Amino acid sequence: MPIMRNAKFLFLLPSLLPFFLTVLIVSPAARGAAQEKPHIVLFISDDHSWHDVGAYGATDVRTPNLDKLAGEGMKFEAAFAASPTCSPSRAAMFTGLYPMRNGAHANHSLIREGVRTLPQYMKELGYRVVLAGKTHIGPREQFPFEYLKNSNVMPPGKKHVLWTDLNTLAVDELLSAHDKAKPLCLIVASHSPHVYWPDTKDYDPKKINLPPYLLDTPETRAARARYYGDVTHMDIQLGEVRASLERHGYAASTLFMFTADQGAQFPFSKWNLYDAGIRVPLLVAWPGKVKAGTTTRAMVSLVDLLPTMMQAAGAAAPPGDLDGTSFLPVIRGETDRHDDATFALHTGDKDMNRTPMRSIRTERYKLILNLKPATRYTSHISDAQGPDGKDYWASWERLAKTDKHAAEVIQRYRQRPAEELYDVATDPYELKNLAGDPQHAKTLAELREKLKEWRLQQGEDLNKVPMPEDARHGEIPYAQ
């Protein structure tokens, strides 16, 4: 019998030869293809408006590492967060769903049970998925990241959670020890430039250029100088992470993206749907894939990040039930168009910002729908007693007693109309509300209908105003 089996094998050898050649030649190539999945790194700054980066035109804040990244990749001029608040914005990034659909529509709230997240999707594509730095998402079991130990530190002499800082040495140690044969998906979330801003002598308050939506007082300038110092601190952290990628042999095979979760904590920025609150910097570099030094006007939302990462990782078709869509064709230079409009919402932050709002942003226009226009607008800046902005807000209130313009600015901040329409092409800081202008009645009606359709698609009950307590709440760690 052994002879007969050997004889049969010899008889079949010619027909089996192509099979063995396939095993010997094609299989190694297939294994190599699996290893060609790019490493993916997403660096997120915290509370950082798009116009506060050198590459985006800022002349008074130093961001050399971000500027270098922009020169090596693609700069997005029209990228938007899904919410101007930390937890909802991050949950939207990590689910590919706008806040009302994923459930985390209020700050410090949780996503709904059963909602799938970035670590689940990317692990299924063969990735090791690590989150370093700020978390502020929950529940933890639905975000099964590998949470990097020692990636958060408390500066000497500080105790409050808002002083927490990113430890880039932990990221360097991770990159040094990781087996590069397994693709790595790494989220690095800085705590800067979120308040509290450290005292700094790196910026002269008298030389700061204030955006036109802020009142010019010495206290505002001092706060802006501290904020700029923290922006530069974050920029240094980004440079350290990119240096680690280069040092440990990742740079050439890494899709690197930088963005912010929302705008800076200044009036008319964070907790607001003006561009200062939801328009964010977005820079993408990928050697050999993204042309260096390019700029795109393609409109994207941060809900598009997850499907873009998945497609870059080889997913044939990211799940069709996501709100986001991949902008990989944009970064490959195949198109300069993506979304016709992006949407954003804000519900509130516990006892603050209890004035829910929704928005639609097209290339030229922005419509903001304020769902409780009769309610006085409050924020940590104007009403909290901590070092969140009360110091310079008090100077605004003093100025308003004698200055008509200052009084108008405070009134605009405190009391929102039912609708706000802005021509962002001619009014980028959204200072002139066109909602009552008959010449823009058609535009207003069209955007109003599109915003209504989106809210219905998101599952909103238009007869009820969602409040912070309507979201799902529970433990939501700020950092590991």
Image (tube, grey):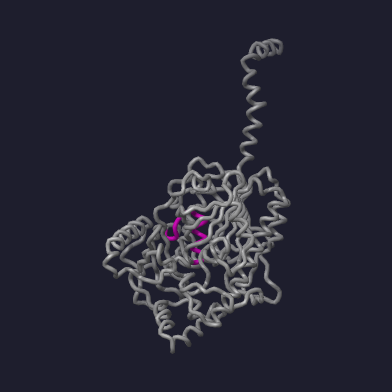
Quadrant, the C terminus: bottom right
Res 358 seen here: yes
Total marks placed: 0
Q: Position of residue 88 (x, y in %)?
A: 48, 63
Quarter of image, res 10: top right
Q: Residue at x 60, y 43 (%)?
A: 288
Res 161 seen here: no
Magenta segment range? Answer: 85-100
Query: Does 171 sit left or right of 326 as displayed?
Result: right
Q: Tell me, yes or no, whether the highlighted magenta stretch contains residue 97.
A: yes
Residue 225's place in the image compared with 102, above or below, is below
Given the current orientation, which residue lies at the most extreme bottom position? 402
Residue 378's place in the image compared with 83, above or below, is below
Q: Position of residue 277 (x, y in %)?
A: 47, 67
Residue 329's place in the image compared with 395, above or below, is above
Query: Does 310 sit left or right of 18 as displayed?
Result: left
For this rendering, which residue is in front, 336 or 43? 336
For this rendering, which residue is in front, 143 or 235? 235
Quarter of image, res 46: bottom right
Q: Main secondary structure of the magenta part?
A: helix
